[in-house]
Image (cartoon, rainbow, N blue to C red):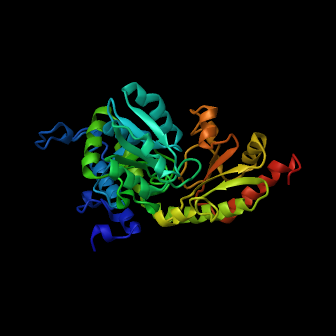
């Protein structure tokens, strides 16, 4: 059986691991050395040095990540934003134009709106649901199209097949942020994407104890991005590599549980009179439900919802929760809740948030690996407490 044919559970454990184990160690050691003895390297990018992301710890991760998405090559970075920004700065240069889906992570949105223009790079946003309208946004200098597998925080699922076809027709590079889905639920290379990006801080590591990013895709683009990263310096240190490699080995176990738990919690919330709207593509009533079933192996552990009340009820609800932690980020073993208007999308103006559908009383949930029955009971008691004061329940 070839490595490509192996199931992801097996790849997570064995892909990329050194055949000749260092000193017989079953677990990959941490190579805490900033520099390595020269072996006749003639190219700057081949010099073995931590900043060049080529220690044994890096190489192991690169092979594993590439195999997880059935891609040709991969690269780890110091953060998800390092992966996103370095990839965009590699694909785009002065005078170029970018197309991006209208619903993006706030940090990406800010980089496109506030940083790229200063470098002479322009961008336009395209509607998620209307591929026919994308042509009108094309320019002669349009170079790339950027999307997310599952959007943050409204957990929408774009027509990813249409994105790839549109890019092929118009000679565009395709970039996709696959963080919310993870390689367990979606593998962009299998659907024709050029570059897949991750905040490994989230599901890939899964333990809320490191910050890291990844670029996965065809070897030509990953190679170019690696060279750009070598100059920008967004490398991942070897100990973080070790923790990421260790955390990834349980991705399949965690993701299966989180997929199921998020589905159960979304169904529970959908039936509550004090909840106005639930965003989760696993729900039959979600506008992208059929698309998600076609594209994804699971709908992830992320959901968001709006309460029937206002900000006061939202704050009371969050304060009443006993299990989820009120904190930003996502994808860890513990459940987290946050208000995107105050965290991931706080850099956007109120008008921009409104246009993106991010209301002030939107709550985003990252479902952990706790017993889902306990989480549902906790959500139920918090809803009762948050609305009892105003007589709504």
Closer to the camera in the image, 155 or 263: 155
Q: Where is residue 287? Give x, y as percent.
A: 60, 58
Location of the C terminus by quadrant is: bottom right
Q: Where is residue 270? Give x, y as percent.
A: 71, 60
Above or below residue 19? Residue 114 is above
Residue at horizontal 54 percent and vertical 65 percent from the top: 290
In this view, the residue farthest toward the right is 391
Q: Is residue 234 left or right of residue 294?
A: left
Above or below residue 84? Residue 196 is below
- Quarter of the figure with residue 232: top left
Q: Is residue 128 left or right of residue 388?
A: left
Residue at horizontal 41 percent and vertical 51 percent from the top: 244
- Quarter of the figure with residue 26: bottom left
Would you say residue 390 is visible in this rendering?
yes
Above or below residue 332? Residue 136 is above
Location of the N terminus by quadrant is: bottom left
Closer to the camera in the image, 170 or 248: 170
Q: Where is residue 123? Give x, y as percent.
A: 43, 35
Q: How many numbered markers are drawn?
A: 0
Closer to the camera in the image, 382 or 188: 188
Q: Is residue 271 left or right of residue 85?
A: right
In this view, the residue farthest toward the top is 118
Above or below residue 263? Residue 96 is above
Closer to the camera in the image, 179 or 56: 179
Q: Where is residue 347? Give x, y as percent.
A: 56, 32
Q: Is residue 162 left or right of residue 256?
A: left
Would you say residue 85 is visible in this rendering?
no
- Quarter of the figure with residue 93: top left
């Amino acid at each position: 059986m070839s490595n490509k044919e192996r199931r992801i559970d097996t790849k997570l454990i064995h892909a990329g691991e050194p055949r000749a184990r260092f000193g017989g160690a079953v677990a990959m050691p941490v190579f805490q050395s900033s520099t390595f003895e020269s072996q006749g390297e003639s190219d700057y990018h081949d010099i073995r040095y931590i900043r060049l992301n080529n220690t044994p710890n890096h190489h192991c991760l690169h092979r594993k990540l590439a195999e997880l998405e059935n891609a040709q090559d991969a690269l780890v970075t110091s953060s998800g934003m390092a992966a996103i920004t370095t990839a965009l700065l590699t694909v785009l240069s002065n005078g170029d134009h970018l197309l991006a889906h209208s619903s993006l992570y706030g940090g990406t949105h800010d980089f496109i709106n506030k940083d790229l223009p200063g470098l002479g790079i322009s961008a336009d946003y395209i509607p998620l649901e209307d591929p026919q309208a994308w042509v009108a946004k094309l320019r002669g200098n349009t170079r790339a199209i950027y999307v997310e597998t599952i959007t943050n925080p409204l957990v929408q699922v774009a027509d990813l097949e249409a994105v790839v076809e549109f890019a092929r027709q118009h000679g565009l590079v395709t970039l996709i942020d696959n963080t919310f889905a993870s390689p367990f639920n979606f593998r962009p290379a299998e659907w024709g994407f050029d570059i897949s990006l991750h905040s490994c801080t989230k599901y890939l590591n899964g333990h809320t104890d490191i910050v890291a990013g990844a670029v996965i895709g065809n070897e030509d683009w990953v190679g170019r991005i690696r060279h750009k990263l070598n100059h920008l310096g967004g490398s991942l240190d070897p100990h973080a590599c070790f923790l990421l490699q260790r955390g990834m080995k349980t991705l399949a176990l965690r993701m299966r549980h989180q997929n199921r738990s998020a589905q159960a919690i979304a169904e529970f919330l959908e039936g509550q009179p004090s909840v106005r709207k639930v965003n989760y593509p696993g729900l039959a009533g979600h506008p992208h439900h059929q698309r998600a079933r076609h594209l994804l192996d699971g709908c992830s552990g992320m959901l968001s919802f709006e309460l029937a009340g206002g900000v006061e009820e939202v704050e009371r609800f969050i304060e009443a929760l006993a299990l989820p932690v009120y904190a930003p980020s996502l994808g860890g073993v513990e459940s987290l809740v946050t208000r995107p208007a105050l965290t991931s999308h706080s850099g956007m103006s109120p008008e921009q948030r409104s246009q993106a559908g991010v209301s002030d009383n939107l709550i985003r949930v990252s479902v952990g690996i706790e017993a889902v029955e306990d989480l549902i009971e906790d959500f139920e008691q918090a809803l009762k407490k948050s609305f009892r004061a105003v007589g709504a329940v």
